Image (cartoon, grey):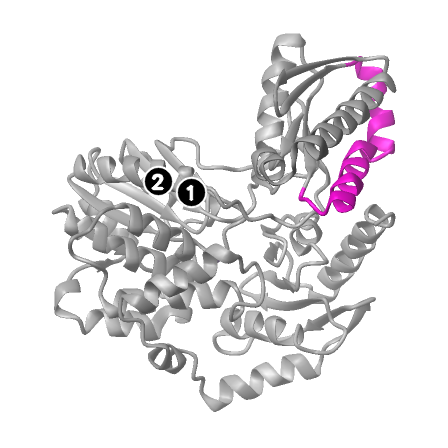
Amino acid sequence: MNIDNYDEVFQKLDDSESQQALSKLHKYISEWAQESKGVMKKAERDRYLVFFEHQYLKDYINKKFSLLEEVRALGEELKMPISVSIGVGASGNIHENDAYARAALDMALGRGGDQAAIKDASQYNFYGGIAKDYERSTRVKTRSFAEALKDFIANSDKVIFMGHQSLDYDAFGAALGLQRAVRTLGKEPYIVVDSSPAISKMAEEVTAIEEYRGMLISPEIARDIITMNTLLVVMDTHRPSMLPDSDLLEKTTKVVVIDHHRRSTDFISNVSLVYHEPYASSTCEMATEILQYIDNDKKITPFESKALYTGILMDTKNFSVKTGVRTFEAASYLRRYGLNTQEVRKLFNMDKDAYVNRAEIIKNSACVADKMLVSVCEEAYPDMKVISSQAADEMLNLAGIQAAFVIYPMDDETYISARSLGTINVQVIVEKLGGGGHATVAGAQVASRDTEAVLEQLENAIQEYLEENEKN
Ligand SMILES: [Mn+2]
């Protein structure tokens, strides 16, 4: 069990307040352990170990790990982001359960904390996960990651950046920013691009810049030039299934992951270095911070600052969600290095047909539950992936709407685009249909062409989600 945000919280409280809060926490945890006649040990200042018999696990599950709620209430009382994360190992022997519990706790923390994860020999199950991702003000992690990344770059023959499939401005912008550090350190950078329409305008601009000649490559070319000594930087995802070419992971010994999505159960396995911050607004925010710690004499260009800024803008919906102090600090750094915000606006101009189609999707939406809209499309419009996510985003501007879903057919499957303002966790909802993402931006691909059937599955998932969160 981990007390989340320990340093943040206890730095801000005065001595007597923090003593009181700690003893309350200790009491809650000890009472919780007694429910199963278990044993509790404080392992570190922010870590507890609890041992209990397997027969009591179902009671904890039935009560939805009531400790989470109690601690959250204490946090609200103190106006501090106090929460606990619980990792449970079950079904193995004591040795195996220890390892499962640690893995489960990592998973709970990677998903943003304030939740319980249970791991047994075959799977993970999650409970809770309501608190928002709180921003941490300490940058120790960023600095040490930047140092390590610099070493990796300097000791590799070249660097290949790879974002997720259907590359977006966040993945692409972060790669365009970080390739500057690679050049400064005297190595050749490459960026793997697919034919994603979402980034085509910026990709055109890249091809027109002399210095970038040959930098954008297809997955096929990446396979050709990668060696065991090439650094492969995976951006804006940590799931092998999301990559345009996951075989590349096997072709080098050096894989780095930079991502801000909540952790899902499939994490790239052979990573050398991970920078995973679910509280960060965007990969571009993380990349901007990293650049500040890789001491460049040669700073980023105005074009690169635009690319980074565009990713931040996309993922925060114009600085309205997941935007923290560090997001604005990153933006102000970019402005200092030549960001031209009017240039950014041109990237978002859209043609009339696309605009009309998007409006059509919004027009056809209906309430699927309180504060939630869903629009089902029988046919996909051109550039459907982009238009559907824009439509879902746009629906959040409607009064009283907290979450929006767009369902549409794509090849032999049905896709769901899900967006939320934050109070409804759409990640948890689409996970029930095999999807993923994070609390405010998520999606799923269902192996069925029957959009009505998928709508029904989504309705059930929403119902289940609402029942799970009834108390809150
Ligand atoms: Mn992103």
In the drawing, what numbered circle is on residue 139?
Answer: 1
The N terminus lies in quadrant: top right
Query: Does 429 appear above or below 336?
Result: above
Residue at (41%, 38%) from the top-left corner? Answer: 141
**Residue type, mark 1 in image:** Arg
Is residue 121 among what the camera can see? no
User: Residue furthest toward the bottom?
Assistant: 352
Answer with left or right where residue 59 lies relative to residue 346: right
Quote the CA–CA distance across marks 2 and 1: 6 Å
Q: Within 8 Å: ligand 1 and the Cβ of disc 1?
A: no
Range of the magenta residues?
52-81
User: x%, y% of residue 190?
Assistant: 22, 53
**Residue beneath disc 2:** 143
Q: Secondary structure at mark 2?
A: helix
**Residue type, mark 2 in image:** Arg
User: Residue furthest toward the top?
Assistant: 94
User: x%, y% of residue 282?
Assistant: 47, 56
Residue in front for this viewpoint, 462 or 14? 14
Residue at (62%, 25%) from the top-left corner? Answer: 46
